[in-house]
Image (tube, coloured by chain):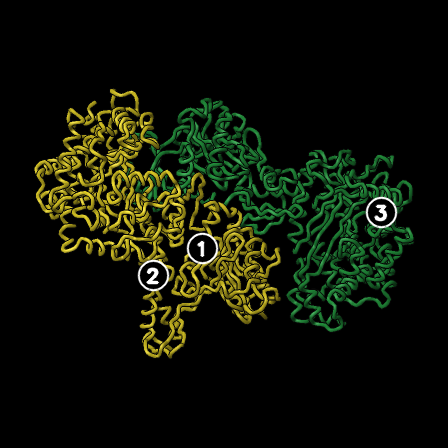
Chain colours: A green, B yellow
Amino acid sequence: MNIQALLQKKSVQPYLLKARYGLEKESQRTSLTGELATSDYPSCLGNRTHHPYIQTDFAETQMELITPVTNSIPELFRYLAAIHDVAYRSMDQVEMLWPLSMPPALPEKEEEIVIAKLDNFEGVLYRRYLAKTYGKRKQMVSGIHFNFEFDDALVQQLFNQQTAFTDYLKFKTELYLKVTRNYMHYRWLVTYFYGASPVSEACYFVDEKGPKEPVRSIRSSQYGYTNHEDVKVTYRTLEGYLSDIARMVEEGKLSEDKEYYASVRLRGGKKVADLADAGIRYIELRNIDLNPYEPYGISEEQVAFLHVFLLFLLWKDEGADADAWIAEGERKNNLVALEHPLAVTAFAEEGRQLVAELAAFIEQFDLSVPADMIVHLEQMLAEPTQTLAGKIYTDSQPSQQAFAVEKGRHYHTQAWKKPYQLAGFRGMELSTQILLFDAIQRGIQVEVLDESDQFVKLTAGKHVEYVKNANMTRKDSYIVPLIMENKTVTKKVLKAAGFRVPAGSEFADVQSALQAYPEFAEQGFVVKPKSTNYGLGISIFKEGASYEAYQEAVEIAFSEDSSILVEEFLPGTEYRFFVLDGETRAIMLRVPANVKGDGVHTVAELVAKKNEDPLRGSHHRSPLELIQLGTIEKLMLKEQGYTIDSIPEPETIVYLRENSNISTGGDSIDVTNQIPQGYKDIAVKAVEALGAVICGIDLIIPDTTRSADEPNAYGIIEANFNPAMHMHMYVYQGENRRLTKDVLDLLFPEV
Amino acid sequence: MNIQALLQKKSVQPYLLKARYGLEKESQRTSLTGELATSDYPSCLGNRTHHPYIQTDFAETQMELITPVTNSIPELFRYLAAIHDVAYRSMDQVEMLWPLSMPPALPEKEEEIVIAKLDNFEGVLYRRYLAKTYGKRKQMVSGIHFNFEFDDALVQQLFNQQTAFTDYLKFKTELYLKVTRNYMHYRWLVTYFYGASPVSEACYFVDEKGPKEPVRSIRSSQYGYTNHEDVKVTYRTLEGYLSDIARMVEEGKLSEDKEYYASVRLRGGKKVADLADAGIRYIELRNIDLNPYEPYGISEEQVAFLHVFLLFLLWKDEGADADAWIAEGERKNNLVALEHPLAVTAFAEEGRQLVAELAAFIEQFDLSVPADMIVHLEQMLAEPTQTLAGKIYTDSQPSQQAFAVEKGRHYHTQAWKKPYQLAGFRGMELSTQILLFDAIQRGIQVEVLDESDQFVKLTAGKHVEYVKNANMTRKDSYIVPLIMENKTVTKKVLKAAGFRVPAGSEFADVQSALQAYPEFAEQGFVVKPKSTNYGLGISIFKEGASYEAYQEAVEIAFSEDSSILVEEFLPGTEYRFFVLDGETRAIMLRVPANVKGDGVHTVAELVAKKNEDPLRGSHHRSPLELIQLGTIEKLMLKEQGYTIDSIPEPETIVYLRENSNISTGGDSIDVTNQIPQGYKDIAVKAVEALGAVICGIDLIIPDTTRSADEPNAYGIIEANFNPAMHMHMYVYQGENRRLTKDVLDLLFPEV
């Protein structure tokens, strides 16, 4: 089989760089000053045993962050970012993740290193065995496991172009075996570029000796985390690999299959033994040190390099004797790993040749890789200070510990800066970001089906739920939003169920609307288009209106819609009741954009100060919006006799807007605890009458101290099937209401 | 209490003409030549006992059509029209409704008049009693009962302006008593104008003698349907009315309360006796003869007259002695009823005065009434031939029977002309019209909540369902239409569930779409905007495309949407599967507009001929659309070498359109029975995977003789949450599928 010829086939080209990626990253939890954490795994993450994203590795302090399988590098990093955000904000805020592969200073007494407190007793037993066999300290090293799979379309296209193999699975296995052998032969290059564990911290090397000088990668060297020397496994064939491992286990050199640690693991079914039938489906690279310059321990360029390097290794001829080829690789890798971080590597010339070959390969196939990747590789070969180990070593003078703490704190600060956002998903609406956060935290798998449409898929075990806009779910019935979309129908349904809604009529032409004038003339009333929602075309007459004013209002409303409503005006304060699953979960009072005078600062200064609140931002990606000082605000100030340079009296509230929308800088005030139960019951029953499960319903209440049962104690003016949730969750004043958790409780009562 | 002063109060004005109306109309079922029907009540109407709209009166042949309470005259007539349509099309098509109050020729043997075969044995017993007491023949007379209620707002406003009454119910009762007494006094005027039973048919007067000459109204005269003479009831007070009726029952002069028949019945609670507590809520005028000139037995102008007349009678002073006042009215009415239809009435002068007063009253209060109503009343007073009785008498020469048959057949023809439409609701979409038809037929109450929005409320007992567009219901979940609205999400969900969907990708910018060219270049593919639905911006390349053609297609698609899809082209025939509640209910093949040549007629003639099909119409108010001969069609003809004047060879199919939409004249061909079960199962399972209950799903099938399990036997290209139903229900070819019945089965399994 001539793989180089196959790779050059035209039908193969579109699929060359298609692949699937997954990543597991371990990190130690520490204090903000770098001491190993003493706390348990965060309880808000639930039972870690089945958590798809956040587990514990060997120690209770050793978090393992796991991405799902992804189809692109950006998608991989989106999940990495989100899972990190969730991990950070699920831990106590005084804890951070240690950014280095080598653990922080370890306890002097080994028994103080706490093995992960798993429910699963087998898991605990296994860790006890590891502690006994390798020592707990060695188990505290962290790193990244990178799972890589060529896209099936690529393998299929290659298969279709050849005749040597008739069995697709055997063909695929052969490809991965070649790549694996080559990777094991050439992995010293990865160690040279990205090795990142030059020195250890206190109490790591206690029972055994470590390297005397700083090195490129303790973790990838003989001092790292490897099996004992008598564990030997061939990669000549899959059968050989499997039978060797089986023999090691039989002979007691390994406790079980999964104890076989090598720089590459062959992966297929659930267990190693499944590979015999299933063939190799993907490979797991285990030799990636944590990169402390990256918030998630690895850069996109590193992943892009690994990908194209693996493809290159599929292309590149390998040595005739597989075992010797790998043994040679192991030897070189150990040498490179133990070189001084600033030393020119012994294999610099071979490295330059390999990079040149790789560059030619990329050019030949016109592969899309990061612009400067090759340049960076060349620089690192030319200048050891540019390697990751070189940089860490340089930046760690005088103290690697201080360097690590500074990096760790920086990522910690970033994660807590805007606690309402979810890194990786910041392009989505805030409510969806928070829902995804809560889902990831609970161990519910998340998948974005359509980002711009806020469409996500949530999965817990076999239970799948689709959610749009964080609140549109399977739980509501189709007819419900259709009812709410139509103001007339909503009113009819609520009225028929006995709720107070503004009396009024719908009109389809100007003449019949004008004829109805006498019905409304003497009372407060509102004229509005039937179906527009943005306040356009609405006229409010709080105390009746002249015929001429009425006529004008009717015409304005008709300019927005072909039908209009004329309705009784209900005086009072408007409250948004957020009802979910038969309970009023939050009640909000929205107050127009305003500042409170102090007799010292100008309006402009007061606005600037109020805008410093980290909850305020723009484009609906923050729970509150920045208060503007535009034309409308200046006009509003003028009407009250102010300019932006006025200095309002102490305690004077100056309004900058008439409307109370949060989107124009209004304040969100949670009043859930202040509103009597009677009104909450009415909201719940009204939502029930509409048949809704999730609903934002707006009540006008003239006086909340009156009983909700009194005549005209309330009026319902609107019901919303897509109610904003984020404004309740991070409020300007009052209690935050984590409505996304209620949504998840509703959808996944079993989790 | 000065009611005239109260009526003039400003706050009362807007409510003067607000009222609620309900109507019950009896009609005999006959053959199309006017013989009394011998068939039973139509079984498709279900159990008549609880049917809200269509019941039987005394005889099995005597249909009683009942409107709900309505708030306007147009609404009343909308229901009347619809209920008539349903009644007609529920009867055998060789039956019609007899348009006269006097029954058609009755059987010579009284026992051949069949009492209504009610389930309810009490009902049967009561009718047997009536037959014995009054004779069956008299019970065969039909008429209209008109229920009238002043709007509560009017009564409330009047109440608020006075001080004589402190009890609202007593006040209201007093108003209705006055109106009733005045109506009974003046009802001769109604008999004069609208009396419509001049002569009887064969075998009506058998045991007793009737009038010797034609009259204005047999029904409203002493020969009509009245209690025996010894039944006397006062209208002086409600207490008196109730105690008189109770005494009559006690003395055996009436079998029960409801046997008391008078021209006006006082109505309140369920039983007569409930009135004591509830007060009078409305009144029932019982003296309205069927108007054979109107399809529903009464005209809108008649109802408008009755309304304004009742308001006028509320205004007008009454006689001091209530009993004498009514007795005087009875006497006059009997005289007028028995006058010859063409005779000037004895009370012509009083009639003219009353109409003048009425006209002045209308003018004083600026009441909106039909433009010519007063003129018509004046004409009738001036010219007896213009009265209803006068016209019928005139038109019935030489035979009233022939006149009645002609009228009856006309209404019958109208009702059957477009059997897919529902009179009264023709402004709504066809599917909704048919749904309403089926609901009315089954005795499910219908209410249109929003006509232009196709929003209806269906009620059976306490069970309420809301339906929009005839197929959007509570049974589907909210997330389902959102999934289907998004093509990418739909495909992801279907693909994840193992269904074949066109492979492809979504692109958000031109560059990434162009980069993907090699993936598609060699195969058939489609480029389309992500979310537009009308075929705009779609390019189909059945056998691949050049880069330039691809680039152009991409740009065209992006001109329609900000995201585009590039998808594999699936060859084959497209079928629409209509799935409801886990079953494929209909499968449709849509064929582009076409005609079949006969070697004789031109294309234009063939089109005209095909368009004669009563199923073809325009504006989606028919199951099929008229085939056009516009620019597109002419172009299409030209491409095939035809003009509209060409004479195609026999059996040659000439297409006038490329697209197969029914809306552009395409043919709908039901193929439900021709498609193998395997494909139906796939449609059902795919709809289940989408979570939908009602769904139109489009499958491309290259060859329906192949098993659905074979690779690539099908591809799913679209799922519709608002699938057209009407096209399945009246098809061009194949079997009609009454999907609205399936919707009702789904919503109301208990009915």
Where residue A717 sits: x, y (%)? 42, 35
Residue A433: x and y in percent read 59, 43
Q: Nearer the viewer, residue B727 or A486?
A: B727
Q: CA distance from mark 3 to mark 1?
A: 79 Å
Depth check, front residue: B403 or B34: B34
Residue, disc 3: A214
Q: Label 1 is placed on what type of residue?
A: Leu
Question: In the rendered image of this protein, does residue B524 appear above or below residue B20?
Answer: below
- In this rendering, would B338 be left or right of B460? left
Q: Which amino acid type corresponds to the residue marked 2 in the rendered image?
A: Gly
- Residue B720's spot in the image, x, y percent? 49, 55
Q: Chain of mark 2?
A: B
Query: Label 1 belongs to which residue?
Result: B739
Residue located 34% across and 56% down the image: B92
Same chain letter for marks 3 and 2: no
Residue that label 2 marks: B617
| Camera-nearest label, 2 or 1 | 1
